[in-house]
Image (cartoon, rainbow, N blue to C red):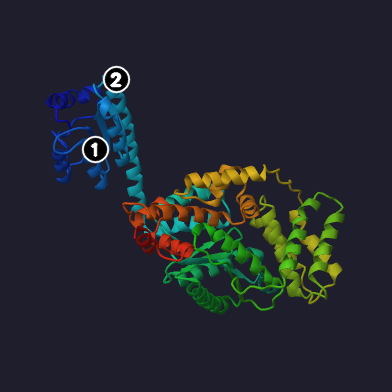
């Protein structure tokens, strides 16, 4: 729109000639006339307006369009002496400006550029509409795939799926959440001469039963981890609520599985987290404490919050010793392999082990090796478990017999592995990661994405953060977000809390409010009132 009739006539007559993708769909003599058209429901892809007009200027029009959050692009036309006003209009979402007198080549270039942006906007809108129309089941599957990628530290899938969660506004945690692991008692299965290939069926029964039990539980999601353990995200208002849900769910699941199969199950509840990207920490903690079943006779549910195990050092030594096994596989005489197996047996057994303990430890060794040697799959594990099952008829074993049994059991695994590559400078990696967080904190950020930008693995970056920054990456990210949120809440004129929430990277305003209160001790609304008063 323009208050000069000749200018409007030129654009109306020549617009399509200048660019065949555009046509004049409306015109107005001033900003108020243009606003009246918009308020009557007319929609345009592009608004071209002079910056100085009677009744309502182009700058005022840009402000009104921004307030109405209309999805259209704007271009300001101004003279040289109005250039400062054109720059001011940019803060209202104006996308470009042209200087008077209009130059044909510049006008064509602008129209071509706007055409590309409009087409991109339309494609993004279509993609968004397609996503929000997805079924509840499909959205749940997206959430499951993301959680599976998160706990397995699958960098590629995390980067692909987290922005989708963000766009779909799927908030997996709005208070506190925890990962609970549920696993079969493998020793019982093998003692009952159940074939290792049938263990998958038993795991499926546990998994499906868990899904049926959590259907009425809001905020619970069931999925398999890389070791085919049933993994459950349980959320609630606070830690006490989450704990109560975990206890109730495990008690129900244990009873049903025992009645159906005669097999007991183990469980472990990891650390309580308030950020979805930190659920890997909860999973890792649950994975650690469930290992204590090596020392406990009766299947039970382990808890992180009350965990004070005397077995921590022993488990660390065991895992470290097992990690040395692959390096011995290339020795055709198996002298080093035998020595390591002997060290494992001496570490774990101070007295003659019974059948159950031998099977438990043998199963544990195999699963740890499968995790270390990713080239091997479930078939290799089943072969080794079958060897273990067929050679554990005795009630008790001597240490020498256990070593020979494990040596036989490891036949499918006797291959060499390659050492990991060297890492970059620790200081440079941490600095690069911090700078990336400062620049992108308002975006969906995961440890995997930051690690990829820093050129290291997620686990290594997490360790470096603790060593060099004295806090985890998620605490650092949260602190950066909260400090920026505090500044926005102190701004005048005041911003809406939900706008601040989105600007610092939170899908859910409820989740943002929860984290803000955890950080500053008061809700964001109250913080804003105090700051403004």
Asked which secondary structure carries label 2, the reply is helix
Determine crowd level at label 2: few under 14, some 14-19, many 20+ residues with C-alpha closer than 10 A.
few
Q: Earlier in the sequence, mark 1 or mark 2?
A: 1
Which disc is residue 105 wearing?
2
Tell me the mark number nearer the camera, choosing from 1 and 2: 1
**Considering the image in quadrants, where does the N terminus appear?**
top left
As rendered, which of 274 and 78 lies closer to the eye? 78
Q: Is residue 531 left or right of residue 81?
A: right
* 345 in relation to 470, above or below: below
Secondary structure beneath label 1: helix
Which residue is at the front of the view, 476 or 106? 476
- Return the x and y of residue 227 as percentages of the image width and height: 61, 60
Q: Is residue 81 left or right of residue 146?
A: left
Residue displayed at 56% across by 65% down? 230
Q: Can residue 63 be seen in the rendering of this structure?
A: yes
Name the spot of residue 12 as percent of width and height, x first. 16, 27
Q: Out of 365 and 187, give the one closest to the viewer.
A: 365
Check disc 1: other Cα within 10 Å, few if <14, some if 14-19, many if 20+: many
Q: Image height check: is 8 above or below 134?
A: above
Is residue 94 visible in this depiction of the protein? Answer: no
Tag 1 residue = 59
Give me the residue at 74% from left, 73% from top: 357
Of residues 384 and 500, the one drawn nearer to the viewer in this rendering: 500
Q: Which mark is residue 415?
A: none
């Amino acid at each position: 729109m323009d208050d000069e009739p000749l200018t409007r006539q030129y654009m109306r007559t020549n617009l399509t000639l200048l660019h065949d993708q555009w046509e004049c769909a409306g015109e107005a003599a001033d900003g108020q006339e243009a606003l009246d058209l918009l308020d009557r429901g007319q929609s345009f892809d592009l608004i071209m307006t002079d910056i100085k007009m009677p009744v309502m200027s182009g700058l005022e029009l840009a402000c009104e369009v921004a307030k109405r959050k209309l999805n259209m692009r704007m271009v300001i036309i101004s003279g040289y002496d109005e250039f400062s006003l054109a720059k001011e209009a940019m803060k209202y979402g104006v996308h470009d400006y042209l200087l008077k007198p209009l130059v044909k080549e510049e006008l064509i270039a602008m129209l071509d550029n706007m055409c590309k942006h409009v087409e991109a906007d339309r494609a993004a809108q279509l993609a968004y509409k397609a996503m929000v129309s997805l079924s509840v089941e499909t959205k749940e599957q997206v959430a499951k795939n993301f959680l599976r990628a998160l706990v397995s530290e699958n960098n590629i899938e995390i980067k692909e799926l987290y922005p989708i969660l963000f766009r779909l506004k799927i908030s997996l945690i709005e208070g506190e959440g925890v990962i609970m692991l549920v696993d079969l008692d493998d020793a019982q299965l093998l003692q009952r001469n159940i074939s290792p290939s049938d263990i998958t069926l038993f795991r499926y029964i546990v998994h499906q039963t868990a899904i049926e039990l959590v259907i009425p539980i809001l905020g619970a999601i069931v999925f398999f981890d890389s070791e085919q353990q049933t993994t459950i995200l349980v959320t609630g208002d606070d830690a006490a609520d989450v704990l109560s849900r975990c206890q109730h769910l495990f008690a129900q699941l244990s009873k049903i599985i025992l009645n159906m199969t005669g097999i007991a199950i183990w469980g472990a509840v990891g650390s309580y987290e308030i950020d979805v990207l930190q659920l890997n920490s909860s999973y890792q903690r649950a994975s650690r404490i469930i290992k204590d079943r090596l020392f406990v006779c009766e299947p039970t549910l382990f808890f992180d919050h009350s965990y004070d195990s005397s077995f921590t050092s022993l488990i660390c030594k065991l895992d470290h010793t097992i990690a040395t096994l692959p390096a011995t596989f290339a020795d055709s005489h198996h002298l080093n392999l035998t020595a390591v197996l002997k060290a494992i047996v001496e570490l774990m057994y101070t007295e003659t082990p019974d059948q159950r303990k031998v099977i438990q430890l043998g199963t544990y060794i195999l699963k740890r090796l499968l995790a270390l040697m990713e080239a091997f799959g479930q078939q290799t594990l089943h072969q080794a478990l079958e060897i273990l099952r067929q050679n554990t008829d005795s009630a008790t074993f001597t240490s020498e017999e256990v070593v020979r049994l494990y040596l036989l059991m490891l036949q499918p695994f006797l291959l060499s592995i390659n050492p990991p590559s060297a890492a970059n400078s620790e200081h440079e990696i941490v600095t690069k990661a911090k700078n990336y967080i400062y620049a992108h904190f308002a975006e969906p950020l995961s440890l995997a994405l930051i690690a990829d930008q820093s050129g290291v693995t997620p686990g290594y970056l997490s360790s470096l953060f603790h060593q060099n920054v004295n806090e985890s990456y998620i605490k650092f990210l949260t602190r950066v977000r909260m400090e920026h949120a505090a500044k926005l809440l102190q701004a005048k004129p005041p911003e809406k809390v939900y706008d601040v929430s989105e600007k610092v990277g939170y899908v859910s305003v409820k989740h943002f409010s929860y984290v803000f209160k955890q950080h500053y001790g008061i809700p964001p609304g109250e913080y804003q009132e105090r700051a403004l008063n």
